[in-house]
Amino acid sequence: MTRKIGVIGMGHVGSTVAHYIVANGFADDLVLIDKNEAKVTADAIDFREAMPNLPFHTNITVNDYAALKDANVIISALGNIRLNDGANEDRFSELAYNSEQVKEVAPRIRDSGFNGIIIAITNPVDVITQLYQQITGLPKKHVIGTGTLLDSARMKRAVAEKLGIDSRSVTGYNLGEHGNSQFTAWSTVRALDQPLTELAETKGLDLEALDNEARHGGYAVFKGKGYTNYGVATAAVRLANVVLSDAKTVLPVSNYRPEYDVYLSHPVIVGRDGVIADVPLQLTDAELEKLQNSADFIKENYEKYKN
Amino acid sequence: MTRKIGVIGMGHVGSTVAHYIVANGFADDLVLIDKNEAKVTADAIDFREAMPNLPFHTNITVNDYAALKDANVIISALGNIRLNDGANEDRFSELAYNSEQVKEVAPRIRDSGFNGIIIAITNPVDVITQLYQQITGLPKKHVIGTGTLLDSARMKRAVAEKLGIDSRSVTGYNLGEHGNSQFTAWSTVRALDQPLTELAETKGLDLEALDNEARHGGYAVFKGKGYTNYGVATAAVRLANVVLSDAKTVLPVSNYRPEYDVYLSHPVIVGRDGVIADVPLQLTDAELEKLQNSADFIKENYEKYKN
Amino acid sequence: MTRKIGVIGMGHVGSTVAHYIVANGFADDLVLIDKNEAKVTADAIDFREAMPNLPFHTNITVNDYAALKDANVIISALGNIRLNDGANEDRFSELAYNSEQVKEVAPRIRDSGFNGIIIAITNPVDVITQLYQQITGLPKKHVIGTGTLLDSARMKRAVAEKLGIDSRSVTGYNLGEHGNSQFTAWSTVRALDQPLTELAETKGLDLEALDNEARHGGYAVFKGKGYTNYGVATAAVRLANVVLSDAKTVLPVSNYRPEYDVYLSHPVIVGRDGVIADVPLQLTDAELEKLQNSADFIKENYEKYKN
Amino acid sequence: MTRKIGVIGMGHVGSTVAHYIVANGFADDLVLIDKNEAKVTADAIDFREAMPNLPFHTNITVNDYAALKDANVIISALGNIRLNDGANEDRFSELAYNSEQVKEVAPRIRDSGFNGIIIAITNPVDVITQLYQQITGLPKKHVIGTGTLLDSARMKRAVAEKLGIDSRSVTGYNLGEHGNSQFTAWSTVRALDQPLTELAETKGLDLEALDNEARHGGYAVFKGKGYTNYGVATAAVRLANVVLSDAKTVLPVSNYRPEYDVYLSHPVIVGRDGVIADVPLQLTDAELEKLQNSADFIKENYEKYKN
């Protein structure tokens, strides 16, 4: 057995995740799972019909939970974004439906004997990640949410465009809930060898506006096409590759935080053993307060839907 | 200027084409065009928000025909597949709408001063490719349709599964219309160092059933998800890469055939100058008759919609 | 554990193999082994210093046979090409030294508990592959030589240049010893939908000259730089990827042939279980005679050096 | 014309650069130049014989300066590292020979009509880069040396290993000469959201030792194999890709510094127009002094060899 990835949920996000993996040969074996048998089967055929024109081969299995037993990574992309009407910009509108789905799926993952790393994209991702951990009984460090890895990318994109530089040349983190209570921790953000807080002054940047752009970035995309998929799928697959290759990369992802007793996004070192170590930040008091608020919000919702 | 690609139409196919290009760094500059400004803008943002987690950079321009002037390749993925109700399995049900779209788009491509290669995916692709050539006035060899590059891949997939081998280890061509009148030219298909016609006997393969699987393969996917995108997007991007790198690869694509005075799919040598040379086949009489039928069908429809 | 590859021998070929793997993220774990500790350590550092500018991470271990225990694939690139003076164009001039090396290395591979696929590049590759199989006791189908996968590529390159097409658009095989007794089996070679034997007439190709170009191609490169590395390393890594991804690709590689009781190159289906099935050819009598000669030559040399 | 790269010098570095480009399809056209016609021809054949087993096509031209006219980027890898005996660890021992070579090559580049970006790897790279600029008369911002992009990678590797993290999760710069007078500007280096100067205290890191490791890293590799190639080739190709894709990435490369009137390494924004903008640093007085020393050393040597 070499690289084996499961993808659960063949909606816009899950199928983009699967395509990105197939097109780049990131997995040798790919297990695709969806309640909509027609859709997941159609995607599998479509991928196989792409392969004669692709350099790499991927073996695709459809709707076989038993095949997850020896997977290295499972990416959960299930969910129904249509429940989110975009009006209130609240990923928690998806929670009731999605948490029910996870309660169906997670026991089947557990029963397969799966012993790898779960990467959850399903929203509201912090609560969903915790649900996956609770139900599967996997070690907390082995269940991770993409969380603000996407929002940090959105922030980098927004900052980079203002500065006229590559978004890969901006460092720093969005923290907390992958949702409305998140925030850009400006004390961690740097570009052009300067803290953004300093650059903001010399370059006349409006940090609050940039923060909003990161937070609401998803909704701009959502309003334009009814879903978002490329940014988040790219984040999830990067995270999977970091796990597979044991890269020990520092990434802001949703991980269990004992200090808050919830999953929320905070940078950690990620490798083959999941969350390998925490990366302590020196946040300002205002940032700590925002993080606490975000944790409280997640906790409240987790309590509501955990059973 | 380095590698510049335009993609027209940000539906399922066009956005998959664009994502595949962005995720692999196949283009340095990408011009995305769609009448639905909200959709194409949303996709562009989504791609930019993927980039911090991607190794390569792509500059994305939205809805700017003038930017096509110095593009190397334009991929036309416009169209409304929903017009195809799947019931009659006929790509010509899309023709009236799509030909109107092309009549709007093609003059704008021409007026941009574009001087590269057009790769058409839009269905019915043979008629649409000819329309693009006629309206833009580009040399016939510079306007190509993906045609049966996809159907040949479908045939290879079907044959390979029967034989338990890699679909890349099957060679040969589907010919004619990318539509119902197409056919697998079994006289050209080989695997395991044997003609499929011989293998069919020793392995008990039903060539007619395999031919149907290739011809109707798209509908299996279509019925499962309402569209097809991964196979055809992969074929189109491979074709674009062959053009960009002047690879001189033998590919079955829709090209102008003087002997029939229409565009239809037949293997040719493809490079930076588009269709560089024909690849004559030694078809059986039955195959030649099928090809003539296919040509007649395309011609009839082209006449109907050309003005 | 995900994708783990061992490379034994960090000369021109082995280090190119390792670089190609690292640069493309083809392996998650890479075990590099060489008697020249300084060289292999230097290469490992060099690769690690490349990684900050590479998108993928690879964990590199140096000179640790125990780490091969759970490798999926071991690529043997050990050998001393300098023993081949290029004058007599005979890979067997390397045999005495290389076979001694294999007799040192193979027992250590066996003792590590390695249970994967060995891919041998070391020359004379057919004899060396058999030595590896004999000493490790691995199933014959799990020990493969790159053999004429390279020579077939050389033949494709030579044919393609004559025809003005992409070398990927030529199919067919060189067979037998990866050495002087090999030959292009023209009955298997096709391009432009025609057998090369027919094309040779219409296009005025000299098949004998092309055959020589494939056979002596390596020496042209060898004379120019004292070694060959890029072609063979690419062939070996492609073969490794085919094994890892269980692609079931038809490839001409050195495999055990019961009919001759030696390893020699002949197309087979390759997957995760090594050589999965034979691909019978319909060779001409003259080709069969050449193959027998090649087998005899290999056998004679194997007998000389096996103990 | 799409992506066209010239590589001058087919030694260990140049041939690795070319292989990395060919193996990944980073260029459509590749012009290889070396005084040793046999070597460069052998490499070109070797690359072409790799292509049937590679997914992408690259057109290779050998020793044709006229073909550089419309190249986007020229990478200079010429040089004779053997002149550097490794004893004194001084890249300036290569200067006399290499500067003579550049004085032969640069006029021919100029006379070809080349109008793109030169990326120099040839050592001592700061002086050589300036020579290229002076002789070709290209705008200063269009002639760049890889400089401390490699040394910064070496520093990141050394720091990352101490911290048990991915070297891609360390940011910061080595500055000055790509040679003995360079230094790690610790005031710019960060990991785990902290300045290295702070981390050094809490984690007990010896910054001086790490600085030495970056500075002498090349010599460790050099001593082990007599040259270094993978790290520097990767840096050079990354730089080329940043230029081709106009990524506007912040990179420490050798660029003309008006304040010192020499080329030396300092972070700048790099894009299709070469060095697009400077990235001012807030160096400590000690660091500024080291940078001045480095500039003085480069200037002195430039004066010696410029004519």
Image: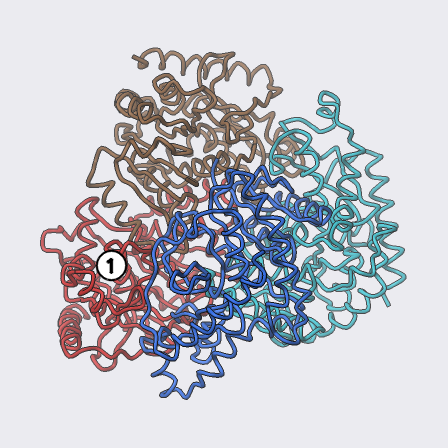
Chain colours: A blue, B cyan, C brown, D red
Give the SS element for disc 1: helix
Residue at the location (38% across, 58% down)? D237
Q: Chain of mark 1?
A: D
How many other residues sit within 10 Å of disc 1, few (<14), some (14-19) or many (≥20)? many
Residue C23 x, y percent position in the rendering: 39, 49
Q: Is residue A8 above or below residue C285?
A: below
What is the x, y in percent for residue B227? 74, 55
Q: In this rendering, would B6 be left or right of D30?
A: right
Badge 1 amino acid: Val
Q: Considering only vertical position in the picture, is C81 above or below A232?
A: above
Q: How many marks?
A: 1
Quarter-of-image position of residue D126:
bottom left
Q: Is residue C130 left or right of residue B264?
A: left
Viewer-side residue, D105 vs A260: A260
Q: Is residue C141 above or below residue B118?
A: above
Give the residue displayed 43% in from the left and 40% down from the top: C3
In the image shown, does D190 or B208 lie closer to the viewer? D190
Quadrant (top left, top right, bottom left, bottom right) of the C terminus of chain A: bottom right
Question: Which residue is label 1 attached to?
Answer: D159
Is residue D29 visible to the viewer in this orientation of the structure? no
Q: Position of residue D6 (x, y in %)?
A: 40, 59
D15 on left or right of D176: right
Q: Nearer the viewer, residue A251 or D224?
A: A251
Residue drawn at (78%, 31%) of the image: B207
Q: Is residue B192 visible?
A: yes
Q: Position of residue D236 (x, y in %)?
A: 34, 60
